[in-house]
Image: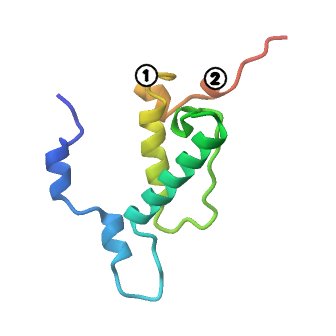
Amino acid sequence: MSTQASFALRSRNPDVLTCIANLSNDEVFTPPEFANRMLDTLAEAWAAKKRGANLWADQTVKFLDPCTKSGVFLREITSRLTQGLENEIPNLEKRVNPTWDDRHETTTV
């Protein structure tokens, strides 16, 4: 049995980051919809520059969000990488939780 809720069930629960973005206070959070549009634009620019390459299927790319508050960008990037790297790293556990050996070649002396 899957521990992940079906799409229909998840769509009934509000996205907590959307709720935070809508709060009225002196902090400004990026709404998830806007973050996704920005990431879509980034992927399109990447593909245009890299002859159609899929940004989300390249395990050598590194991402940095130095102004993380709610983590909306990192959450959406992680979701896209999890799907995009499925062919290159079929094992979901290794894809989302790699070990040191998975990320670095070991050298024997």
Residue 56, how many percent across, how many down?
A: 52, 38
How far apart marks 1 and 2 lie (CA) works out to 15 Å
Give residue 60's mark.
Answer: none
Residue in front for this viewpoint, 48 or 6: 48
Residue in front for this viewpoint, 92 or 53: 53
Residue 60, how many percent across, how many down?
A: 65, 34
Give residue 101's mark.
Answer: 2
**Exactly how many numbered labels are in the figure?**
2
Identify the residue at horizontal 56%, vertical 52% (top origin).
42
Q: Secondary structure at mark 2?
A: helix
Amino acid under label 1? Asn
Q: Quadrant of the N terminus?
A: top left
Q: Secondary structure at mark 1?
A: loop
In the rendered view, tell whether residue 5 sits above or below residue 28.
above
**Is residue 89 rendered to the left or right of residue 53?**
left
Which quarter of the figure has residue 21?
Answer: bottom left
Identify the residue at horizontal 85%, vertical 11% (top origin).
109
**Is residue 88 rendered to the left or right of residue 108?**
left
The answer to which of marks 1 and 2 sits earlier in the sequence is: 1
Q: Which residue is mark 1?
A: 91
